[in-house]
Structure formats: C-alpha cells, structure tokens
Amino acid sequence: MFTRHSSLSPKGAVNFMQQTHSSRSGPAEGEQVPVLTLSHAAKTFGPVVALADGTIHIEAGEIHALVGENGAGKSTLVKILAGLHHPDSGDFQVAGQSVQFRNVAESKDAGISVIYQEPTLFPDLSVAENIFIGRQPKGRFGLISKATMVREARKLFERLGVPIDPTRIAEGLSIADQQIIEIAKAISLDAKVLVMDEPTAALSGVEVERLFAVARSLRDRGTGILFISHRFDEVFDLCDRITVMRDGRYISTHRTADVTVEQIVREMVGRDIGALFPKTPAEIGDVVLKVDGLSRAGVFRDISFEVRAGEIVALAGLVGAGRTEVARAVFGIDPYDAGDITFDGRKLRPRNPQVAITAGMGFVPEDRRKQGLVMDLSVARNVTLTLRNKYTTAGLINGGAERRAAQEWSKRLQVKTGSQEYAVSTLSGGNQQKVVLAKWLATDPRLLIIDEPTRGIDVGTKSEVHRLISDLAGRGIAILMISSELPEVLGMADRVLVMREGRITAELDRADANPESVMHAATSSAGGTL
Amino acid sequence: MSSALDHKNATTPAPDAGARGAVASLLRMRELPVLIALALLVLITYLINPLFLTAQGVKDLLLNATIIMILAVGQTLLIITRNIDLSVGSMLGLVAFGTGSLFSAMPDVPIIAVFVIGMAFGALLGAVNGALVTLAKVPALVITLGTLYVYRGLNNAWAGGKQYFAGDRPEEFGALSVNTFLGFPVITLLAIVVVIAVAIYMSGTRPGRDLYAIGSDPDAATAFGIKVSKRVFLAFLANGALAGLAGVLYASRFNSVGATTGTGMELTVVAAAVVGGVAIFGGSGSVTGAALGAVLLTTITSSLTALRVDKFWQQAIVGVLILTAIIIDRVASLRTAKKLRISEARNV
C-alpha cells in the first residue's frame, strides 16, 4: 500500500544529523531579519527531556509549518514561544532582540499571540470584552466605554470578514468562532507572530477554509505565522516553509515547493527502532474480542477488527483519529449507533461497562491520574478498587484480605512504594501505571485495553511497562493497545491497526509494519501522494 | 488603536443601540426578576395590610435592609471571583463592639474618625482572610469558616459579658439611623452611595472587569496575565472594609453591641447575593442585584410578619424563595445557552 519514493532528491538524501549541523547558522534563504528566531532551545522536566534542540526561524509575511510526530516536542516549543515554559538553554530572539519571557504577558507584549486548538475565552464576558480584556478603551471619567469597545470589535470582525456579534457573551460559541476571536485579539494587539497550534483539528471544512483565508490575509500584511498541523494536505496547501521535528530535535527546514509528503514523513519518523522493547513471542489462541461494523456518527465509522488470546494488537494513528473513542465504545463507556461487539462468542450490551468488566475486560485509560486512579487513596485501596465485592463481607470491606491481595499484585508487578498504605499520588508515573495494571489484573481479565501505556513515563520504566505487557500476552491475555508512539507500536504489536479521521485505514502484520507505512496510513489517503 | 478615542463618539451610543436595544437590554437584565418579585411582594402585602406602607413602615423596611445590603455588596465582589467570605458576621461583630468600646473610651471622638477606624479595622480582618486564601491556596470556604470562629472567639474574649448600649454613644451617632433625607434614612442613603460606587467600579473599570474574568475562568485569567492573587486579595480587603462600615452602622442603628453581635449574618448575606442573581460559581451577577436581593430578603420577613404568617413558617418561606431564585436563574441561563447555540448554528 505504500511505495517507497525511489528517486530521492539530493537534499533528502543528506544524513539528518549532518543537516541539523549544517543549519546551525540558521536558514540561508531569506535576506531579511527573521521576526522570530529560536535556536537550540532545550527543556527538561526532571528526567524527561521534552525538548533537546528547539529551533525555528519565522520570517515576517510567511506561513511556516511545524510538523512532527506526537511527542516530537512541538507543544513544548509552542509553550516556550508563549512564555509558559522557560527554556533551560538556547537563544530566543524576537525582531532581532534577545528575549527571556517570564510569563505569558511578556510574550504578548513582545508581539507573539498563540491560538490553541481550543481557545480559552471567558464564557461569561461579551465577545468584545474578551478581545479587549485588560486594555478596554476608556471614555468619560476614565471609565470603560462599552460603545467604543463594541465598535472596535465590529471593525476587527469586518476586517476579517466574519460576522460575529461583539455584544453576545462568549458562552456557546463554536470553536471556529472562538479562534476567530483570538485572531481578532491578536490583530488588535498588533501581533508580529501568530502561532496556531493545531487550529483545524476541531473545525469543519468550511470553517477551515475561512480560517485559511484569514491566515493568508494576515500573512500578506506581514504577520509571521507558525502553523502546526498533522494534516499534510493543509500544510502543503497553506504554508510557505516546513520545519520538521523529531524526538525533541530540530531536523530540517524546507521550502514547501521543494519537498514531497514522503520526504517529510520520512524525516518525521526516521530513527532507529532499537531493541528497546523485548517482545516475547506468545502463543496466539482463539478470538476473544470481535468488533464488527462499529460506527458512531461524527466520531468513528465502520470499525471492524479482532483480538485473539495472547495477541497484542496496536491501534495506531494520530491524536484525534478516534482511537480512544473506539476503545471507550468497546468497553461500554460511550454509546455507538451501529455495529456489534462480540466477546468470547457472546454479544455485549452497549453502554454498560459493568457487563464488560464481568465478561472479563479491563480498561487502562490514557489519563491515569484522572480516570485510572483515585490519587488520594492508598496503593492497596486502588489495586482492589475493581473487586470490592470479592473482599467484602456483609457490605464491609475486609481490610486484611484487601491488603493481602494488593500486596501480591504489587509484588508481581514490582510496584516500588514504601508501603501499601501510601497514597498513589506519591508514586512516580511508571509505578502509578503499574498500580492501574495491577488493579485490572486482579480481576483476572481475558482482554486488556491499554490507552497510551507509557505516556509521561521515563525511559527506564517504559521498558519495564513494555516487558509487563508482553508478559501478560504470554499468559494468554488479549491486549488492545492504543499508542501514539511509533517505536512502541512497532516494537510491541503482533498486528497494527491504523486509524485516520475515524476510520481504519490500514491493517498491518508485524512484518509489514514500519514507520513509513504506519505514518502514511495515519496521515494521508492510502497509497497516493497529495 | 484604543488610544485614538474620539471623545464625542465614545459617549454617544452606537446607532443600533437605540430605544429597541435599551428595552432588550432591560429584559436581559439579571436584576429584573428580583425587582419584579420585590414590587409584587410589596404590592400584595400593601393590599392586604395597608399599614405596611406608612412612612414609618417604609423607613423600617429600608433600615432593616441597609446593613445586609452593604454586606451583600462586599460578598458579591468575592462570589464573582469564585470566592466567598463566611466570616462577615464575625467581622461585623468585632467592628460593632469595637465602635462601642471606642465611644466609651473616647466619648468625644469625631464620628467621621469612627467610620475611618471601623473600616480600617474591617479591612485588616478582610486582609487576613485574603492573605490566607491567596497565599495558602486553600479554598475560601474553608479559610473563612475558620476565621468565622476565630474572629467570633476574639470578640467573645474581648467583650466577655460586657455590652455597650446606645446611651453610651453620642446622640448624633444614633441620629444617623433616625434622621431622614427625602424620606430615606441617612444610613440607607450611605448604603445606596456604596452600591452605586461599587457598581460603577465593577462595570466601568478594568480591575472591576478583571474580577469577572477571574470568576469566569481562573486559569484563562492567569494565562492572560491578570494578577489573580492580587485582585482576589484586594476583593477580600474591600469586603472587610465594607463589613467594617456595616459594623459601625450596626452600632448606630441597634441599641446594644456585645459578644454575639452579627452571629449567623453570613448566611443571610450569601442568600441575598444569590437571590439577587449573583452566580454562586462566579463570573456573573452584579452588586445592584445583590443589593436588591438584600432588600427582597429583609422585606419578605417584614411582610410575612405584616401578613401575620406564623413565625415558624417564615424561615421555610425564605428558603423556598432562595430555591426559587436559583431555579429561575438556572432555567434562564439554560435557555440563553440554547438560544446562543441556535443562533450560532445559523451563522455557520
């Protein structure tokens, strides 16, 4: 389904590392001073390196795309530009001036406006007030002049060609309109650089067109725009240059006209898939879970797959492709409109997680702090949370039995904690994940759905979690793993299902799955170039 | 761009904000239901018992509302920012007793100085609350529940069994609550001035609007560079100063001040704000609404008495009123949200 591009351009053939070095002096093209340059910015959070080499040069009057896999460091870079994070090292200049932002306000003052995927407006305040908050125009007696504020807001919307009533309150506005309001605010702030962090993810086609029209007109007026998107058609349609990041590092910058989608994809994923994930072969048994034609309007469509005992099936794709939503529907948390879920040969009733648990399903959610654990309860209490009935006499929890069960599972999974009685919130991310796993393993499941098993877990513990999952499959448990990390998908899975925009676009056996084939299925229509 | 303000244009309303717009915005006013309820209540009570609206009757109604009104204004500043101060009753008690002590120690102290000292004392107590909430990052509900008892304890220790009576205070001081100007008691006029001043501050100044932004979405407010802690601290301080003012007025209006003065007042104050359309989760509502809520709450008690409703039932009826206010508000806001969604769908 994916053919390797045979004729590599000389530029694409250059070793990535070399290219990184050669571009240290900054992009050669462009005679004017870039309006924003970030060079070799690094940021670590404890042991986790979020950004090793954040480099981007944005010129006035260009739309510059920033692409990379999930976890490539794009968000960290954006947060540095926005003044939310402070880089540990590196050089940051705006309009030729060195800057060090201590907070968001300073970034704004320097002329940088950031528009997030879901803007944060004040729902109770009027649209006009949302634009001018903190700098409302003043009239008589130094009081705020609402009339002026509304008139100025109206002018902004006219300029953008978007009819939004400035006097209405912000609550209930569509995300597209909220973004337009953020853009209006950026214009009124006279922003030199506009950063748009995946602005199109939640927009419909018409809304995307409207946003692009606005972006182009801003570019023509000399604003530098940084556009972050996973959709290559949009990147190639809208942007003048593309910067690729991978594993927290700057890889390359190209003129859009000079590159192909294939080349960009290769640069995004090109790295060693080391022997980091010791997948042990397991005996594959009968079908445990069969999903047939599952659909939910606007979320996912016609999803069919099987998971067998002892098999690890990875659900790959970009964030927002609908993977978690499918998993939640299978587990009975979310409803679905059509299709069947068969577990161990029996049809499951929809919208009933209790049935799924009783049947032998476990679900390890993506956000373990919010959904997987009760952070303030002890390790023991968390482990036995799913099987309260088992350790209950006459409605009261039997503390002794609970502790013994918890102890056993914690030992088996090697949870590192001082005591079973410590609150889960005191553990590290990796150990918290083990507690969630222990919680479900204690129910003796036939199938485990694990959403992003190693998100936010440091490298050392990561491979421990992987070993554990591999081990579980070896015991005959069927595993459905959602992961946005390619090495994890490729290293762990027996089979890879790739989803894009709510559909399964590829099913790849372990032998056929490689970074290019998975990335390609995740980002563009099968086989074709854009 | 906002600096290039045309002064003339700034003061004339936009063309489409004419009479039609004025009516529409009047109907959208959150205070309107309270105003209507108040008018109905007074009218019905008057029809049944005409004595309710004699000059003395009206004066009593206003006097009863005055102190709660001022406290409700202060409380509204906090509720709008998603905070609350439950210690207002205790603060009022301390300041009221302090006022009594001050007059007893220095009978010739100028009345204006008493007001300044009382408000400064209240501001200090409020600042303690504000500092604890903003520095310790503990919910205001918990902090001020604690200071409610601490301040009351201080008051008990200070007063012991002692009480000061109106006779201990100069006549001009007590006269503030007796004399009228255009039919309004002087202290009520004072309260109205406070309401108007704070209302203008809340709707017409940037710090005032910041308070709404903070309550509407505290995280977004931080992200915007609004100084959330500072604004919240100052709101607590202002609330304390207003509680101090209310304490001084209490000493003027009522005969005796002692260890238990103001006990339980905090709940009436919060209820007044809620009945007046201040959203308990912050972000919307107005001090005018809260003041009207205070008038409605105190008036309903008086009219139930005037209607000879059994005293035992009065509290239950006040409770029903509070619930009704909340339900009306909820239904109205759901309806607005739906309307906004529909208008939104048409735009796209």
Image (spheres, coloured by chain):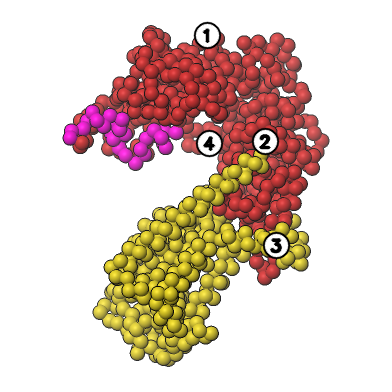
Colour of chain A, in one word, is red
Classify mark 3: helix, strand or loop.
loop
In this rendering, which labeled residue sits more in front, label 2 or label 3?
3
Real-space Cα distance between discs 2 and 3? Answer: 33 Å
SS at badge 4: strand
Q: Chain of mark 3?
A: B
For residue B203: magenta?
A: no
Nearer the observer, disc 4 or disc 3? 3
Q: CA distance from mark 4 to mark 2?
A: 36 Å
Tally of numbered tags: 4
Main SS, magenta region, reads helix
Q: Residue at x 70, y 37 (%)?
A: A211
Q: Pointers 4 and 2 in contact (CB under 8 A)?
A: no
Image location (x, y in percent) of residue A155: 75, 51
Which residues fall within the magenta stretch? A367-394
Which quadrant of the rendered structure holds the C terminus of chain A?
Answer: top right
Marks 2 and 3: CB-CB under 8 Å? no
Give whichever of discs 1 and 4 has the lower sequence position. 4
